[in-house]
Amino acid sequence: MGHLRALTVDQQVGLLFVILFGALVVVSAVSGLVMLRRSDQEGSHWHQRVKAELRAIWAGAIVFWLAWVSGAIGATLLFAVFSFFALREFITLAHTRRSDHRSLILAFFVVLPAQYLLVGFRTFDLFTVFIPVYVFIAIPVISALAGDPERFLERNAKIQWGVMVCIYGLSHAPALLLLEFKNYEGRGAFLVFFLVVVVATAQRTQEGAARWLRRRPVARHIDRSFSYRAWAIGATTAAIVGAALYWTTPFKAGQALAMAFIAAGAGSFGDFVMKALKKDAGVPSWGNRSAITGAVGLLDRVAPLCFAAPVFFHSVRWYFQFRG
Protein backbone atom coordinates (compact mmCIF):
# COMPACT_ATOMS: atom_id res chain seq x y z
CA MET A 1 0.00 0.00 0.00
CA GLY A 2 2.91 2.33 0.65
CA HIS A 3 4.01 1.87 -2.97
CA LEU A 4 0.49 2.71 -4.18
CA ARG A 5 0.43 5.92 -2.14
CA ALA A 6 3.84 6.85 -3.54
CA LEU A 7 2.51 6.78 -7.11
CA THR A 8 1.99 10.07 -8.92
CA VAL A 9 -1.52 11.43 -9.45
CA ASP A 10 -1.56 10.34 -13.10
CA GLN A 11 -0.39 6.84 -12.17
CA GLN A 12 -3.06 6.51 -9.48
CA VAL A 13 -5.72 7.73 -11.90
CA GLY A 14 -4.60 5.19 -14.49
CA LEU A 15 -4.63 2.38 -11.94
CA LEU A 16 -8.13 3.30 -10.74
CA PHE A 17 -9.30 3.49 -14.35
CA VAL A 18 -8.07 -0.03 -15.04
CA ILE A 19 -9.50 -1.42 -11.79
CA LEU A 20 -12.91 0.26 -12.07
CA PHE A 21 -13.68 -0.26 -15.74
CA GLY A 22 -11.95 -3.65 -15.81
CA ALA A 23 -14.20 -4.84 -12.99
CA LEU A 24 -17.27 -3.42 -14.72
CA VAL A 25 -16.41 -5.19 -17.97
CA VAL A 26 -15.96 -8.51 -16.16
CA VAL A 27 -19.19 -8.13 -14.16
CA SER A 28 -21.13 -7.11 -17.27
CA ALA A 29 -19.79 -10.08 -19.23
CA VAL A 30 -20.57 -12.57 -16.44
CA SER A 31 -24.05 -11.11 -15.97
CA GLY A 32 -24.69 -11.36 -19.72
CA LEU A 33 -23.73 -15.03 -19.75
CA VAL A 34 -25.97 -15.76 -16.75
CA MET A 35 -28.87 -13.93 -18.39
CA LEU A 36 -28.56 -16.08 -21.51
CA ARG A 37 -29.08 -19.21 -19.41
CA ARG A 38 -32.25 -17.91 -17.70
CA SER A 39 -35.36 -17.57 -19.84
CA ASP A 40 -38.21 -18.11 -17.36
CA GLN A 41 -40.44 -15.31 -16.08
CA GLU A 42 -38.52 -14.95 -12.83
CA GLY A 43 -35.30 -14.85 -14.80
CA SER A 44 -36.72 -12.16 -17.06
CA HIS A 45 -37.56 -9.97 -14.04
CA TRP A 46 -34.07 -10.56 -12.63
CA HIS A 47 -32.64 -9.82 -16.09
CA GLN A 48 -34.32 -6.41 -16.23
CA ARG A 49 -33.26 -5.53 -12.70
CA VAL A 50 -29.63 -6.44 -13.30
CA LYS A 51 -29.58 -4.49 -16.58
CA ALA A 52 -30.94 -1.41 -14.80
CA GLU A 53 -28.35 -1.70 -12.02
CA LEU A 54 -25.49 -2.17 -14.47
CA ARG A 55 -26.61 0.84 -16.50
CA ALA A 56 -26.67 2.92 -13.32
CA ILE A 57 -23.18 1.75 -12.29
CA TRP A 58 -21.76 2.38 -15.78
CA ALA A 59 -23.37 5.84 -15.81
CA GLY A 60 -21.90 6.64 -12.39
CA ALA A 61 -18.43 5.49 -13.43
CA ILE A 62 -18.53 7.53 -16.63
CA VAL A 63 -19.77 10.60 -14.74
CA PHE A 64 -16.87 10.26 -12.30
CA TRP A 65 -14.32 10.23 -15.09
CA LEU A 66 -16.02 13.13 -16.85
CA ALA A 67 -15.81 15.05 -13.59
CA TRP A 68 -12.13 14.19 -13.32
CA VAL A 69 -11.31 15.17 -16.90
CA SER A 70 -13.27 18.43 -16.76
CA GLY A 71 -11.55 19.55 -13.57
CA ALA A 72 -13.03 21.29 -10.55
CA ILE A 73 -15.04 23.82 -12.58
CA GLY A 74 -16.51 21.22 -14.91
CA ALA A 75 -17.34 18.88 -12.03
CA THR A 76 -19.07 21.69 -10.14
CA LEU A 77 -21.20 22.50 -13.19
CA LEU A 78 -21.98 18.81 -13.66
CA PHE A 79 -23.22 18.40 -10.10
CA ALA A 80 -25.22 21.64 -10.44
CA VAL A 81 -27.06 20.04 -13.37
CA PHE A 82 -27.70 16.96 -11.24
CA SER A 83 -29.09 19.18 -8.47
CA PHE A 84 -31.41 20.91 -10.93
CA PHE A 85 -32.93 17.68 -12.24
CA ALA A 86 -33.09 16.07 -8.79
CA LEU A 87 -34.91 19.11 -7.40
CA ARG A 88 -37.27 19.07 -10.37
CA GLU A 89 -38.15 15.44 -9.62
CA PHE A 90 -38.73 16.29 -5.96
CA ILE A 91 -40.89 19.36 -6.61
CA THR A 92 -42.95 17.54 -9.26
CA LEU A 93 -44.29 15.28 -6.50
CA ALA A 94 -44.52 17.96 -3.79
CA HIS A 95 -48.00 19.25 -4.82
CA THR A 96 -47.21 22.96 -4.71
CA ARG A 97 -49.66 25.77 -5.48
CA ARG A 98 -49.57 28.74 -7.84
CA SER A 99 -48.61 30.99 -4.94
CA ASP A 100 -45.40 28.96 -4.50
CA HIS A 101 -44.07 29.87 -7.94
CA ARG A 102 -41.94 32.75 -6.70
CA SER A 103 -40.35 30.53 -4.05
CA LEU A 104 -39.65 27.90 -6.68
CA ILE A 105 -38.07 30.46 -9.00
CA LEU A 106 -35.87 31.53 -6.09
CA ALA A 107 -34.85 27.91 -5.44
CA PHE A 108 -34.09 26.95 -9.03
CA PHE A 109 -32.64 30.13 -10.49
CA VAL A 110 -31.11 31.98 -7.53
CA VAL A 111 -30.30 29.56 -4.69
CA LEU A 112 -28.98 26.72 -6.86
CA PRO A 113 -26.48 28.78 -8.91
CA ALA A 114 -25.50 30.84 -5.86
CA GLN A 115 -24.72 27.73 -3.81
CA TYR A 116 -22.52 26.26 -6.53
CA LEU A 117 -20.78 29.59 -7.09
CA LEU A 118 -19.92 29.62 -3.39
CA VAL A 119 -18.49 26.13 -3.85
CA GLY A 120 -16.49 27.20 -6.91
CA PHE A 121 -15.00 30.18 -5.07
CA ARG A 122 -14.17 27.98 -2.04
CA THR A 123 -16.05 30.21 0.39
CA PHE A 124 -16.73 27.19 2.58
CA ASP A 125 -17.79 29.12 5.69
CA LEU A 126 -20.56 30.94 3.81
CA PHE A 127 -21.33 27.90 1.66
CA THR A 128 -22.19 25.82 4.74
CA VAL A 129 -24.68 28.35 6.19
CA PHE A 130 -26.12 30.01 3.09
CA ILE A 131 -29.05 27.60 2.67
CA PRO A 132 -29.74 26.53 6.28
CA VAL A 133 -29.78 30.14 7.50
CA TYR A 134 -30.44 32.71 4.79
CA VAL A 135 -32.45 30.68 2.29
CA PHE A 136 -34.60 28.99 4.93
CA ILE A 137 -35.60 32.45 6.13
CA ALA A 138 -36.10 33.87 2.63
CA ILE A 139 -38.37 31.13 1.27
CA PRO A 140 -41.25 31.51 3.78
CA VAL A 141 -41.00 35.30 3.55
CA ILE A 142 -41.48 35.20 -0.21
CA SER A 143 -44.29 32.67 0.17
CA ALA A 144 -46.05 34.86 2.72
CA LEU A 145 -45.86 37.84 0.38
CA ALA A 146 -47.91 35.79 -2.11
CA GLY A 147 -50.85 36.05 0.31
CA ASP A 148 -51.87 32.38 0.35
CA PRO A 149 -52.09 30.92 3.90
CA GLU A 150 -53.56 27.53 2.91
CA ARG A 151 -51.24 24.69 4.10
CA PHE A 152 -48.54 27.35 4.41
CA LEU A 153 -46.25 25.39 6.74
CA GLU A 154 -46.57 22.17 4.74
CA ARG A 155 -45.87 23.83 1.39
CA ASN A 156 -42.82 25.73 2.62
CA ALA A 157 -41.43 22.72 4.47
CA LYS A 158 -41.55 20.69 1.25
CA ILE A 159 -39.70 23.35 -0.72
CA GLN A 160 -37.13 23.82 2.03
CA TRP A 161 -36.55 20.08 2.33
CA GLY A 162 -36.14 19.75 -1.44
CA VAL A 163 -33.57 22.55 -1.44
CA MET A 164 -31.76 21.02 1.53
CA VAL A 165 -31.44 17.56 -0.01
CA CYS A 166 -31.08 18.28 -3.72
CA ILE A 167 -28.97 21.44 -3.59
CA TYR A 168 -27.30 21.71 -0.19
CA GLY A 169 -26.54 18.02 0.25
CA LEU A 170 -25.40 17.29 -3.29
CA SER A 171 -23.28 20.45 -3.55
CA HIS A 172 -20.91 19.02 -0.94
CA ALA A 173 -19.72 16.38 -3.44
CA PRO A 174 -17.92 18.85 -5.77
CA ALA A 175 -16.78 20.78 -2.69
CA LEU A 176 -14.63 17.75 -1.85
CA LEU A 177 -12.73 18.39 -5.09
CA LEU A 178 -11.60 21.76 -3.77
CA LEU A 179 -10.38 20.70 -0.33
CA GLU A 180 -6.63 21.08 0.04
CA PHE A 181 -4.55 19.21 2.60
CA LYS A 182 -0.82 19.09 3.17
CA ASN A 183 0.85 16.60 0.80
CA TYR A 184 -2.53 16.00 -0.87
CA GLU A 185 -2.81 18.93 -3.25
CA GLY A 186 -4.76 18.41 -6.47
CA ARG A 187 -6.23 15.04 -5.47
CA GLY A 188 -9.71 16.05 -4.33
CA ALA A 189 -11.34 13.89 -6.99
CA PHE A 190 -10.09 10.83 -5.12
CA LEU A 191 -12.21 11.90 -2.13
CA VAL A 192 -15.28 11.97 -4.39
CA PHE A 193 -14.34 8.54 -5.73
CA PHE A 194 -13.86 7.24 -2.18
CA LEU A 195 -17.25 8.62 -1.10
CA VAL A 196 -19.16 7.22 -4.07
CA VAL A 197 -17.57 3.77 -3.75
CA VAL A 198 -18.24 3.36 -0.03
CA VAL A 199 -21.83 4.66 -0.27
CA ALA A 200 -22.62 2.38 -3.23
CA THR A 201 -21.00 -0.59 -1.46
CA ALA A 202 -23.08 0.00 1.65
CA GLN A 203 -26.30 0.19 -0.37
CA ARG A 204 -25.71 -3.01 -2.34
CA THR A 205 -24.44 -4.96 0.67
CA GLN A 206 -27.33 -3.82 2.84
CA GLU A 207 -29.85 -4.91 0.21
CA GLY A 208 -28.21 -8.33 -0.08
CA ALA A 209 -27.97 -8.74 3.71
CA ALA A 210 -31.63 -7.79 4.14
CA ARG A 211 -32.72 -10.50 1.69
CA TRP A 212 -30.45 -13.07 3.32
CA LEU A 213 -31.17 -12.29 6.99
CA ARG A 214 -34.91 -11.66 6.66
CA ARG A 215 -34.92 -9.83 10.00
CA ARG A 216 -37.92 -7.99 11.38
CA PRO A 217 -37.96 -4.56 9.71
CA VAL A 218 -37.48 -1.44 11.82
CA ALA A 219 -40.34 0.41 10.12
CA ARG A 220 -42.50 -2.01 8.15
CA HIS A 221 -44.72 0.69 6.65
CA ILE A 222 -41.72 2.49 5.15
CA ASP A 223 -39.38 -0.31 4.08
CA ARG A 224 -39.92 -4.01 4.71
CA SER A 225 -36.24 -4.79 4.21
CA PHE A 226 -34.52 -2.20 6.43
CA SER A 227 -33.15 -3.59 9.70
CA TYR A 228 -30.41 -2.45 12.05
CA ARG A 229 -28.39 -5.62 11.43
CA ALA A 230 -28.52 -5.23 7.64
CA TRP A 231 -27.57 -1.55 8.03
CA ALA A 232 -24.60 -2.50 10.23
CA ILE A 233 -23.43 -5.15 7.76
CA GLY A 234 -23.64 -2.68 4.89
CA ALA A 235 -21.80 0.10 6.74
CA THR A 236 -19.13 -2.27 8.06
CA THR A 237 -18.48 -3.78 4.62
CA ALA A 238 -18.20 -0.28 3.16
CA ALA A 239 -15.78 0.66 5.95
CA ILE A 240 -13.53 -2.29 5.05
CA VAL A 241 -13.62 -1.28 1.39
CA GLY A 242 -12.79 2.28 2.42
CA ALA A 243 -9.82 1.07 4.47
CA ALA A 244 -8.55 -0.81 1.39
CA LEU A 245 -8.76 2.44 -0.59
CA TYR A 246 -6.91 4.54 1.97
CA TRP A 247 -3.97 4.97 -0.43
CA THR A 248 -6.16 7.24 -2.59
CA THR A 249 -6.96 9.54 0.35
CA PRO A 250 -5.10 11.70 2.87
CA PHE A 251 -6.11 9.20 5.59
CA LYS A 252 -4.30 6.37 7.24
CA ALA A 253 -6.00 2.96 7.06
CA GLY A 254 -7.77 3.35 10.43
CA GLN A 255 -8.91 6.86 9.58
CA ALA A 256 -10.24 5.71 6.21
CA LEU A 257 -12.13 2.90 7.96
CA ALA A 258 -13.83 5.35 10.32
CA MET A 259 -14.60 7.93 7.62
CA ALA A 260 -16.03 5.27 5.32
CA PHE A 261 -18.27 3.93 8.08
CA ILE A 262 -19.59 7.43 8.84
CA ALA A 263 -20.28 8.22 5.17
CA ALA A 264 -21.83 4.82 4.40
CA GLY A 265 -24.04 4.89 7.50
CA ALA A 266 -25.27 8.40 6.74
CA GLY A 267 -26.01 7.48 3.13
CA SER A 268 -28.03 4.41 4.11
CA PHE A 269 -30.09 6.36 6.64
CA GLY A 270 -30.62 9.07 4.03
CA ASP A 271 -31.95 6.55 1.54
CA PHE A 272 -34.31 5.27 4.24
CA VAL A 273 -35.61 8.81 4.86
CA MET A 274 -36.22 9.34 1.15
CA LYS A 275 -38.20 6.10 1.03
CA ALA A 276 -40.43 7.50 3.76
CA LEU A 277 -41.00 10.62 1.67
CA LYS A 278 -41.88 8.46 -1.37
CA LYS A 279 -44.40 6.53 0.73
CA ASP A 280 -45.93 9.82 1.79
CA ALA A 281 -46.13 10.94 -1.85
CA GLY A 282 -47.58 7.56 -2.87
CA VAL A 283 -45.02 6.79 -5.58
CA PRO A 284 -42.55 3.89 -6.03
CA SER A 285 -39.77 6.12 -7.35
CA TRP A 286 -39.01 9.83 -7.59
CA GLY A 287 -39.00 9.95 -11.35
CA ASN A 288 -42.28 7.94 -11.37
CA ARG A 289 -41.23 6.81 -14.84
CA SER A 290 -38.27 5.24 -16.62
CA ALA A 291 -35.16 7.40 -16.63
CA ILE A 292 -31.73 7.22 -18.23
CA THR A 293 -30.28 6.13 -14.90
CA GLY A 294 -32.34 2.95 -14.83
CA ALA A 295 -35.88 2.03 -13.88
CA VAL A 296 -36.12 4.83 -11.32
CA GLY A 297 -35.49 8.56 -11.21
CA LEU A 298 -32.23 10.42 -10.76
CA LEU A 299 -33.07 11.34 -7.16
CA ASP A 300 -33.43 7.65 -6.26
CA ARG A 301 -29.83 7.15 -7.40
CA VAL A 302 -28.25 10.18 -5.75
CA ALA A 303 -30.35 10.32 -2.54
CA PRO A 304 -27.77 8.41 -0.42
CA LEU A 305 -25.04 10.70 -1.74
CA CYS A 306 -27.09 13.78 -0.84
CA PHE A 307 -27.02 12.72 2.81
CA ALA A 308 -23.53 11.22 2.90
CA ALA A 309 -21.70 14.07 1.12
CA PRO A 310 -22.25 16.83 3.73
CA VAL A 311 -21.54 14.47 6.64
CA PHE A 312 -18.34 13.24 4.97
CA PHE A 313 -17.23 16.71 3.88
CA HIS A 314 -17.57 18.26 7.33
CA SER A 315 -16.08 15.21 9.07
CA VAL A 316 -13.00 15.39 6.84
CA ARG A 317 -12.66 19.14 7.10
CA TRP A 318 -13.19 19.20 10.86
CA TYR A 319 -10.75 16.35 11.48
CA PHE A 320 -7.89 17.91 9.52
CA GLN A 321 -8.54 21.39 10.91
CA PHE A 322 -8.54 19.95 14.42
CA ARG A 323 -5.30 18.05 13.84
CA GLY A 324 -3.76 21.00 12.02
Image (cartoon, rainbow, N blue to C red):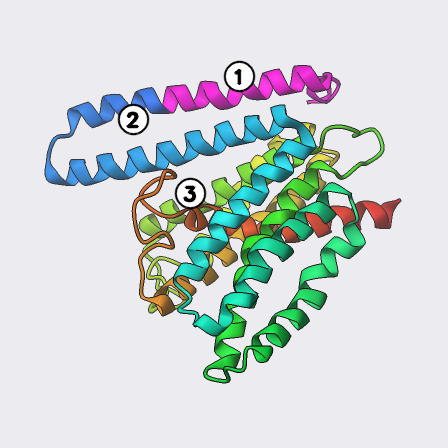
**Does 38 sit left or right of 132 as displayed?**
left
Q: Which residues are magenta?
A: 1-27
Residue 279, position as x, y percentages in the image:
35, 66
Q: Callout 3: few (<14), some (14-19), or many (20+) C-alpha neighbours within 10 Å?
A: few
- Residue 204, disc: 3
* Residue labelled with disc 2: 31
Vertical side of 203 occupied by 74: above or below: above
Q: Callout 2: few (<14), some (14-19), or many (20+) C-alpha neighbours within 10 Å?
A: some
**Does 168 sit left or right of 197 as displayed?**
right
Q: Is residue 279 magenta?
A: no
Label 1 SS: helix
Most distant residue in the bottom direction: 149
Q: Amino acid at mark 3?
A: Arg
Which quadrant is home to the N terminus? top right
Residue 80, position as x, y percentages in the image:
58, 44
Camera-side mark, 3 or 1 = 1
* Residue labelled with disc 1: 18
Q: Callout 1: few (<14), some (14-19), or many (20+) C-alpha neighbours within 10 Å?
A: few
Vertical side of 43 occupied by 268: above or below: below
- Which residue corresponds to the image point at 50% horizontal and 24% vertical from the top-left? 20
Write down the quadrant of residue 143 in the picture: bottom right
Q: Which is more N-terminal, label 2 or label 1? A: 1
Q: Does the magenta stretch mainly form a helix, a strand or a loop?
A: helix
- Which residue corresponds to the image point at 37% horizontal and 24% vertical from the top-left? 27
Foreground: 134 or 14?
134
Residue 60, position as x, y percentages in the image:
48, 34
Q: Which is more N-terminal, label 2 or label 3? A: 2
- Which residue corresponds to the image point at 54% horizontal and 54% vertical from the top-left? 166
Q: Amino acid at mark 1?
A: Val
How far apart marks 3 and 1 lie (CA) works out to: 22 Å
**Does 31 sit left or right of 165 as displayed?**
left
